[in-house]
Image (cartoon, rainbow, N blue to C red):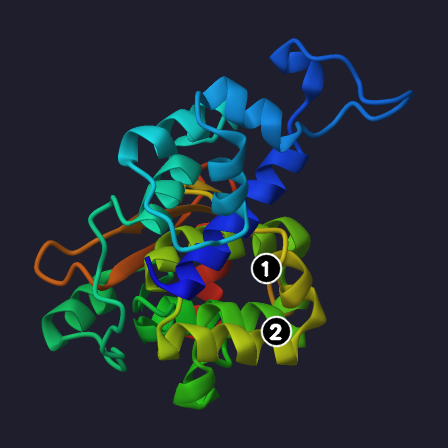
Amino acid sequence: MDEERRRELGQFLRDRRANLVRAEHGLPPIGRSRTLGLRREEIAAFAAVSVTWYTWLEQGRDINASRQVLESIGRVLRLSAAEQAYLLAMGGYAALPLAEVTAIEAAPPHLQALLDALDFPAFAVAPDWGIAGWNSAYAGLYSRIAEVVPEQRNLLWLIFTDPALRRMLPDWEETSRNFVAEFRAEAGPRLGSAAHTALVARLAAASDEFARIWSDHGVAGFASRQRIFVHPEVGELTFEHHRLVPSDAPDLHFVLYTPTPGTPTRERLAQLTTGTG
């Protein structure tokens, strides 16, 4: 396990331990008011490992943790499925992608043709969350996409640095947290790579809010959900947010915004794409 990954693993364990509810583990409060957070020795006891060894794990020391031990710790910490997968990835026990990935600046022509065939907003995202392709419906929803320079055409970068996009998202705080948690879950195995480190550093330097959310170490798998945009020309648009992975291009994933039935979204979207709004 490399140094960056060990450090991330230790911080992740500390954060999750600090947020555990003591009563849910059958433990009394510490002092008069502290009801959150377990001690290291309590985690170690529940996971059946030595206190010294667990302490070293949280400190990011160069030790080898077995898969079984990490799974046991994950159960004590009551991690979600995505968090457990992330913990195992940090320990080197998940199927990891290469530390460095080749930047994908444009979707392959046949996949771009698929995007173009869709009549609702859709775009392709690379492993670093760079936007590698989009269709006319997405350009209607987010009109700035074509003018953004390639080095800034990154979903996280735009969410945290484009005021116009932020104004379109009434639930920006929740959306930004979801994206950061999903990005961490997907990019976690590449922690320590030059490209990933540079992207995170650039985002943190550009946005104090990204730095704050990133420091929370949230981890979450993607889940389809409702997305609401307030477009400056046609008003509220309500979509169902889905994601698909092409079998012949697994390094890309498609983000699809399908209009929610029973809302005027499809008609309002048509106004944007036909220029009749």
Going 38% across and 68% down the picture, which residue do you hit? Answer: 129
| Image side of residue 113 versus residue 228, left or right | left
Q: Which residue is mark 1?
A: 214
Mark 2 and mark 1 in contact? Answer it, CB < 8 Å.
yes
On residue 128, the disc is none
Locate the C terminus by quadrant: bottom right
| Image side of residue 216 versus residue 100, left or right | right
Q: Which is nearer the eye, 245 or 127?
A: 127
Disc 1 marks which amino acid? Trp
Disc 2 marks which amino acid? Ala
Mark 2, secondary structure of its residue:
helix
Regarding residue 126, the answer to whether it shows in the image is yes
Residue 133 location in percent, x, y?
29, 74
197 to 68, vertically: above or below = below
Residue 27 location in percent, x, y?
69, 13
Going 21% across and 53% down the picture, which residue do you hit? Answer: 245
Going 63% across and 66% down the picture, which residue do you hit? Answer: 210
Q: Which residue is mark 2?
A: 204
Regarding residue 267, the answer to whether it shows in the image is no
Going 61% across and 32% down the picture, which residue do you hit? Answer: 40
Q: Gap in Å between the C-alphas at discs 2 and 1?
A: 8 Å
Locate the N terminus by quadrant: bottom left
Residue 223 location in percent, x, y?
41, 40
Q: Earlier in the sequence, mark 2 or mark 1?
A: 2
